[in-house]
Image: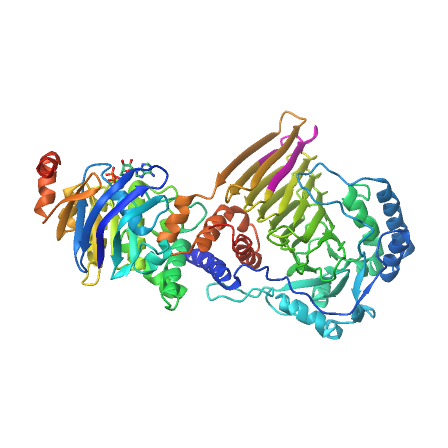
């Protein structure tokens, strides 16, 4: 009865959802703050601050120069205004660009030396930095075959990486997984070759800003033919007040390699908004494959729209080699404002890009998110599945570009874009851009907008579920295609988040 | 078990009276059938009993085991033991039938302060019950009612009823859309749940169902009222002569 076994797994997943709804009772779970002594760079942004960040990271001169060039450019350009989001003007001089726990001044040699307060922070977030079998935060439930899964974690706290687990074990497989600051010091040849090669310094306002001031982030290199022996993940935590977080992630999958990478993020509750502007670059060589999954749960602001994170992020994968593959999966539930388009450059022939997205906006949240599929090589394929859910007063926009270049013969795109509205004060928008410059390629686009159906909710309630459970169940059903694309541990967390982030949206 | 007294109900949006004083009592262990012309208010009665939005109770009372249920939320009524097999079961895309069932079973258990069913226990029971209704594993995996045939949807309703073990079961035209064999299966499903502690209210247009599920009492509903009550012979009378005679008689 193999059929039943797979059912059983899903069962457990949904039970988690239900329990989460009951237990959490509406609050943003990660809104507490760690009381820890910090060291800040002076407020504001100028070339001295850029140099100071470079200096703190003990960077070689080429890196400092790179940053300064970026900064000089940034000073000359203007913030883009084309997205469907509104927020008060950001005063870039009224925030900190570098915040590091004092206890991190001397870089700890191993996790045992890390400040217990920091370790406790991750423990409380459900990300214990011990080298254990499970991705923390996921309790084994009796239905789930947890198996022997290991997940290596790079933990970034404000501006610095606190530590990276399983480094030794990964090293023996030839995999490099460390903070980007360490990579700049230890693997300059790789960083020099690839940094900015997917998202150039000149790419856009926030990418340029990030290039100037990024303080840390993760670095991954998978050598030819290696299947990474465990999932890799980075957990970003913003803790300091009035501080922006600018992280940089660089992932290189060499020929014929494979890696699955997970990213999670949270921040304390604050009345004032905070900026998070990250850049993620992924390089995928011939026959290699990368899966990149995000559960974005930054503080979304309060019910009246005060505070929250401005999440302005540039993520892009370059499928350089033939038959290379990338899959982006994102669950966006947090942030006051999200502006994010994880994209795929399908350069190699027969390369494939996939984008699966759930974006949930409640209360006064705004999200303008989607993807770009740029088909350059022959026989390239892309697939986009986007599920947008709006509740409260929120605005949710899907913005996606599919571009078939003249040489991208026989290429295919399929886009499915569904919006779900809860209540009548929120909005959903779909903005597809399609460019086809050859006549052998095909682009298919389907879009739907629907409301949470009262008859469905009543049906669930007649069977005994309360209204929030019913909404969570129906919405999780709506998102199923995307949830299935996530690694199991993340799927469970994501289902809970779907439920939690919609609390208070009905009734 | 279920006591309905002079229940009067308007549509919330229009000022239209649909139930005009319904009186009905279903005792524990008994099966009551309701028959009546299209549009007489049978489904409306089932919705009002289970707490659907859109109706305004303007008079009367309803109690389940001496508890007033009109002030309760739908899920509270469900936890109190009220079950409605819908005339038109709803599709829920992306939600597995098993997931749905287990969430429902455990929600009710929790509401009553009982321990949740373990997954092993649950699976065992679902498999057994599904088998006797000839619902296969494939159907249990599929999203709730999505792409189910009319008859499959109805069998699925009975599976849910069997799993939830309600005290008061309301079946709204569960027989419509069933082929002869499915009718037998469903009836057997219902009959196997008949016991001294459980009441049934079976809404139907056809005597055929009542051949299998033998009712203790038959009511005729017309124009928002129960106009006649009798034994099983009343259903036969409707089957043979239609409603005109009965309606003329009570007019
Ligand atoms: N939401 C509604 N809006 C408008 N009219 C309604 C609504 N609900 C019920 N009605 C009307 O109330 C009356 C009773 O409907 P109901 O569905 O209860 O009948 P029924 O006895 O179940 O009929 P059938 O045998 O055809 O299923 C009908 O005239 C119907 O049109
Ligand atoms: Mg009806």
What main secondary structure does the magenta stretch of the protein show?
strand
Relative to A189, A278 lies left or right = left
Question: Could you tell me which residue is drawn at 69 percent across and 49 percent down?
Answer: A311
Relative to A297, B40 lies left or right = left
Task: Quadrant for the C terminus of chain B, please.
Answer: top left
Nearest the camera: A129 or B26? Answer: B26
Question: Could you tell me which residue is drawn at 49 percent across and 61 percent down?
Answer: A16
Quadrant of the rendered structure where residue B208 is?
top left
Looking at the rendered structure, the number of numbered marks drawn on it comes to 0
* Magenta residue span: A396-414
Relative to A204, B107 lies left or right = left
Task: Indicate how the structure is coloured in the image.
Answer: rainbow
Task: Quadrant for the N terminus of chain B, please.
Answer: bottom left
Residue A280 point in image, percent of width and height = 73, 50
Quadrant of the rendered structure where residue A401 is?
top right
User: Does residue A284 show up?
Assistant: no
Residue A115 point in image, percent of width and height = 74, 73
Residue A412 among those drawn in magenta? yes
Q: Which quadrant contains ligand 1?
A: top left
Quadrant of the rendered structure where residue B37 is?
top left
Residue A124 point in image, percent of width and height = 63, 68
Nearest the camera: A378 or A355? Answer: A355
User: Does residue A461 show up?
Assistant: yes
The relative height of residue B60 versus residue A79 in the rendered view (above or below) is below
Residue A188 among those drawn in magenta? no
Nearest the camera: A459 or A27? Answer: A27
Residue A48 point in image, percent of width and height = 91, 54
Question: Could you tell me which residue is drawn at 21 percent across and 63 percent down?
Answer: B197
């Amino acid at each position: 009865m193999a059929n039943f076994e797979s059912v059983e797994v899903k069962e457990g997943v949904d039970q988690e959802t239900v329990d989460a709804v009951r237990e959490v009772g509406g609050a943003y779970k990660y809104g507490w703050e760690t009381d820890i002594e910090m060291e800040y760079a002076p407020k504001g942004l100028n070339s001295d601050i850029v140099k100071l960040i470079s200096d703190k990271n003990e960077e070689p001169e080429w890196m400092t120069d790179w940053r300064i060039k970026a900064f000089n450019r940034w000073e000359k350009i203007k913030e883009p205004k084309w997205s469907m989001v509104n927020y008060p003007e950001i005063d870039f001089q009224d925030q900190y660009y570098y915040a590091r726990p004092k206890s991190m001044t001397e870089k700890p040699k191993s996790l045992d030396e890390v400040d217990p307060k920091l370790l406790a922070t991750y423990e409380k977030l459900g990300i214990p930095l011990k080298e254990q079998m499970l991705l923390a935060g996921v309790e084994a439930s009796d239905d789930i075959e947890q198996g022997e899964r290991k997940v290596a974690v790079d933990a970034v706290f404000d501006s610095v990486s606190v530590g990276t687990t399983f480094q030794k074990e990964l090293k023996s497989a030839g995999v490099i997984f460390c903070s980007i600051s360490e990579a700049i010091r230890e693997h300059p040849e790789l960083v020099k070759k690839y940094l900015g090669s997917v998202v150039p310094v000149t790419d856009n306002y926030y990418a340029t800003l990030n290039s100037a001031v990024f303080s840390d982030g993760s670095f991954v290199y998978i050598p030819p033919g290696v299947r990474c022996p465990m999932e890799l993940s980075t957990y970003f935590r913003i803790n300091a007040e009035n501080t922006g977080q600018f992280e940089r992630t660089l992932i290189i999958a060499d020929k014929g390699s494979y890696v699955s990478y997970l990213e999670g993020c949270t921040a304390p509750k604050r009345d004032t908004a905070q900026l998070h502007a990250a850049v993620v670059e992924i390089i995928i060589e011939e026959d290699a494959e990368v899966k990149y999954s995000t559960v974005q749960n930054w503080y979304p602001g309060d019910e009246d729209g005060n505070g929250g994170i401005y999440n302005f992020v540039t993520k892009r994968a370059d499928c350089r080699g033939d038959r290379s593959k990338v899959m982006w999966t994102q669950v966006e539930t947090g942030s006051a404002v999200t502006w994010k388009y994880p994209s795929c450059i399908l350069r190699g022939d027969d390369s494939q890009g996939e984008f699966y997205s759930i974006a949930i906006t409640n209360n006064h949240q705004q999200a303008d998110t989607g993807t770009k599929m740029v088909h350059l090589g022959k026989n390239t394929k892309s697939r986009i599945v986007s599920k947008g859910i709006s509740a409260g007063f929120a605005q949710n926009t899907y913005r996606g570009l599919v571009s078939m270049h003249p040489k991208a013969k026989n290429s295919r795109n399929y886009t499915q874009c569904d919006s779900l509205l809860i209540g009548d004060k929120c909005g959903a928008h779909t903005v597809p851009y399609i460019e086809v410059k050859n006549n052998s390629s095909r682009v298919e686009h389907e879009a739907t907008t629907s409301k949470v159906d009262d008859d469905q909710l009543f049906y669930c309630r007649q069977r005994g579920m309360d209204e929030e459970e019913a909404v969570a169940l129906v919405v999780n059903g709506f998102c199923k295609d995307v949830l299935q694309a996530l690694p199991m541990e993340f799927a469970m967390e994501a289902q809970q988040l779907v439920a939690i982030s919609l609390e208070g949206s009905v009734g | 078990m279920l006591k309905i007294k002079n229940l009067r109900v308007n549509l919330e949006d229009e000022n239209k009276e649909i139930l005009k004083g319904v009186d009905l009592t279903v005792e524990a262990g008994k099966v009551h059938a309701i028959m009546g012309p299209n549009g007489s208010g049978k489904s409306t009665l089932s919705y009002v009993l289970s707490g659907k939005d859109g109706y305004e109770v303007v008079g009367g009372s309803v109690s389940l085991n001496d508890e007033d249920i009109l002030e309760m939320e739908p899920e509270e009524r469900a936890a109190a033991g009220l079950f409605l097999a819908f005339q038109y079961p709803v599709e829920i895309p992306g939600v597995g039938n098993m997931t749905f069932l287990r969430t429902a079973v455990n929600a009710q258990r929790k509401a009553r302060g009982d321990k949740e069913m373990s997954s092993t226990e649950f699976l065992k029971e679902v498999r057994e019950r599904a088998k006797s209704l000839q619902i296969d594993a494939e159907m249990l995996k599929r999203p709730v009612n999505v792409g189910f045939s009319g008859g499959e949807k109805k069998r699925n309703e009975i599976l849910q009823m069997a799993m939830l073990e309600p005290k008061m079961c309301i079946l709204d035209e569960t027989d419509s859309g069933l082929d002869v064999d499915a009718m037998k299966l469903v009836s057997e499903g219902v009959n196997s749940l008949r016991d001294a502690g459980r009441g049934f209210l079976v809404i139907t247009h056809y005597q055929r169902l009542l051949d299998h599920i033998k009712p203790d009492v038959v009511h005729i509903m017309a124009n928002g009222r129960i106009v006649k009550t009798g034994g099983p012979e009343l259903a036969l009378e409707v089957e043979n002569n239609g409603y005109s005679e009965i309606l003329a008689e009570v007019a």
